[in-house]
Image (cartoon, rainbow, N blue to C red):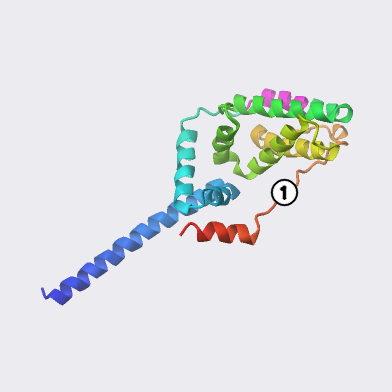
Amino acid sequence: MSPILTIVLIIVVLVVIAAIVYGVQTGRRKKLQSTFGPEYDRVVADTGNRNEAEKELREREKRHAELELTELTPESQAKYRAAWEEVQIQFVDDPTEAVGTADELVTRLIAERGYPTGEYDERLADLSVEHANTLQHYRDAHEISERSKDGSASTEDLRLALVHYRALFGDLLGTHPVSTPATTESVPDEAPAPAPRTPADTDAATDTSR
């Protein structure tokens, strides 16, 4: 075999290997993007490096796979729906207390589903694998709840907190948390979508990951 032919074969082999590696990486990336949805872009932006972000997300998947998660029985679902309706009734007389109760109720539901309820950031990471689409609602609700403790949250803020909590609550519950429309007059039925990422945010995340 001539030296030129040998070099050509080596180049072809290297190209094929590179194509296979690229294909594997692309497949893994698409799977992570499908699993984590908006959380994927958020972690990329937070870490400033796509490879580091994907490593973190794979670690989340690994921890999640070790959890013993359970679905709620119809009886448990009914119990939580009733408890949520009580929270909305409570909101009319005491919005601050209602938001605190909502936070406790969501935490209790998280625990009953089988998720650890330790540190808040760890809770977010564990929930992100199956509940990424409602995770920003949880963040927004938690942020308002924290501000309400020192009295810096307005009644409108507290109303939004309850709406945000309900988005995650319904996702974890597996059904709409409100079964009696008459109890929802003080709170809108649908949670607003989390604030969209700006093109600048997306461009920055993409540029720093290469």
Horizontal side, residue 164 vs residue 56: left or right: right
Q: Is residue 118 above or below residue 198?
A: above
Q: Main secondary structure of the magenta part?
A: helix
Q: Quadrant of residue 86?
A: top right
Residue 121 vertical position relative to residue 9 in the rendered view, above or below = above
Q: Which residue is mark 1?
A: 193
Q: Amino acid at mark 1?
A: Ala
Residue 177 location, x and y as percent?
A: 74, 33
- Looking at the rendered structure, the secondary structure element under dot 1 is loop
Residue depicted at x 54% and y 40%: 129
Nearest the eye: 143 or 141: 143
80 in magenta: yes
Q: Residue 176's quadrant in the figure?
A: top right
- The image shows residue 142 at horizontal and vertical percentages of 69, 35
Q: Residue furthest left?
A: 1
Identify the residue at image location x=21%, y=73%. Answer: 8
Location of residue 166 in the rendering, given as x and y in whole percent from the top left corner: 73, 36
Q: Kindly tell me whether residue 6 is visible in this rendering.
A: yes
Question: Which residue is at 51% across, 48% downward?
Answer: 47
Residue located at (10% from left, 73% from top): 1
Between 66 and 75, the residue placed more toward the observer is: 66
Badge count: 1
Specify whether 91 is left or right of 78.
right
Q: Which residues are magenta?
A: 72-84
Does residue 19 sit above or below 117 in this rendering?
below
Residue 160 % position (x, y): 78, 40
Q: Answer few, some or many: residues within 10 Å of disc 1's Cα (few below 14, many 20 plus, some between 14 and 19).
A: few
Residue 175 visible from this viewpoint: no
State the quadrant of the C terminus: bottom left
Say which of 142 and 193 sits in front. 142
